[in-house]
Amino acid sequence: MATMINQKTSVLGSLIAQNKDQILREWIAEMNDSARRGDLIKEVELRSQCARFLDLLAQGTAGAGTNVQSGAYDPMREMLGEISQSRAQQGFSAKETATFVFSIKRSLFTVIRDAFEKDPKTMAVEIWNATELLDGLGLYTTEVYLKAREERIRRQQEEMLELSTPVVKLWDGILALPLIGTLDSARTQIVMESLLESIVQTNSKVAIIDITGVPTVDTVVAQHLLKTVTAARLMGADCIISGVRPQIAQTIVHLGINLLDVTTKATLSDAFGLALQRSGFALVKPQKKEKQDQ
Amino acid sequence: MEKIPILRMGEFLLATIQVDMHDRLALALQDDLTTRISETGARGVLIDISSLEIVDSFIGRMLGNIAAMSRVLDAQTVVVGMRPAVAITLVELGMSLTGVKTALNVDAGMELLHSAVDGEREFYGSRI
């Protein structure tokens, strides 16, 4: 039975090879009607992709029948992978990307129909084989497309993490860490690491953690903050938490979070003042010189 | 058996941990330090752990114990130079070493010891 299917599908392969030009013409016409995005991809590029697809399809069916996972389809899968990845970047939707494969059906079926006009049974078997094969390839395209999307989202998340944890030096021995966005475990870890590294590098004795940009403080966030403060203290640096908004102060007390061991200030400027004082600096406003003539 | 050298600097003792701590070494250090404090009547102990890369809960507890014991013997303890990774590990282990003074480096630690001891003197000066 298996050999029979192999034989049949290699018939499919030779059919494709023989009628390549006709299939290609009808396929591109079909795509022009339905799914081609003239704004996103050039006709020449599309035509070369289609031609290559047909070559590889003929090669694959000749080697391994409809088993898309087998080694004979490696170059085909590689090519589809490249196409979906580039389309995901170009801005095609998942549907448009998969339609690239599915839209070949009509032209391929026409060829099969013409070839087996006198033998309906073989025609049905061949059409089923072709459907199975193209469905497999189409689904693979969608899968790669989604993977490319997910990869992009993951990369953006990483970039966001790095962007959102800058440690700035305010003064000799005073660091500030303005936090923006919700704090979760992964972010706290990065925040903590970059703060502690900066403390060592700049030899700072005071670090100000500004939470003006943190939308809500719940027990988890508070726990993360306390961990950071404790780790900094273990290294010998003092931490001040600033930017506590009235609502957050209320929430903290309602939740029963103990922030007594941590210095907190309402604004960053208050915290900076305290940090200067602790480091032994004083800000003095220069007195205006009295006018000589009066 | 290897030992951690304890140096005397004026009225302070200086212990620099430069090898990986194992439990027996930690206990030996605890023993040595308390003995030296009572022998010399030191007012402060500075423990430099800047080359310590690996800690566990035992070492963490030992640092806390040394601080508590020195306090009983009337000496202040400052732990200096803790690495970020070590600090994070201790926090994740739930050990915040409350009651142990810390400083960024030996310089800052010495300053801290001096000011703590001077403060004590000022406070008790009239009575001693």
Image (spheres, rainbow, N blue to C red):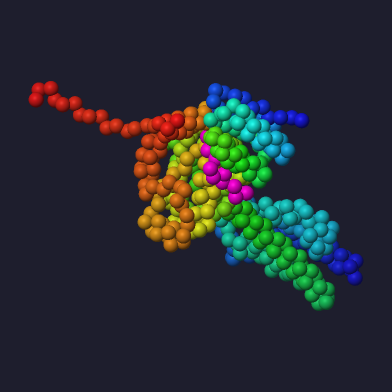
- Depth order, front residue of B4/B66: B66
Q: How many labels does the image show?
A: 0
Q: Nearer the viewer, residue A124 or A216?
A: A216
Taking the spot 20% from the left edge, 29% from the top edge, the residue there is A288
The residues colored magenta run B93-106
Q: Is residue A152 visible?
A: no
* Residue A246, quarter of the rendered image: bottom left
- Write the residue at 70% across / 35% down: B28
Image quadrant where one finds the N terminus of chain A: bottom right
Q: Is residue A67 magenta?
A: no
Residue at coordinates 81% horizontally, 73% vertically from top-left?
A: A125
The x, y position of residue A70, in whole percent, is: 81, 58
Query: In the rendered view, would you say B18 is above or below A248?
Result: above
Q: Main secondary structure of the magenta part?
A: loop
Residue in the image at 61% along x and 56% along y:
A150
User: As drawn, is A284 to the left or to the right of A128?
Assistant: left
Image position, residue B101 (x, y; %):
53, 38
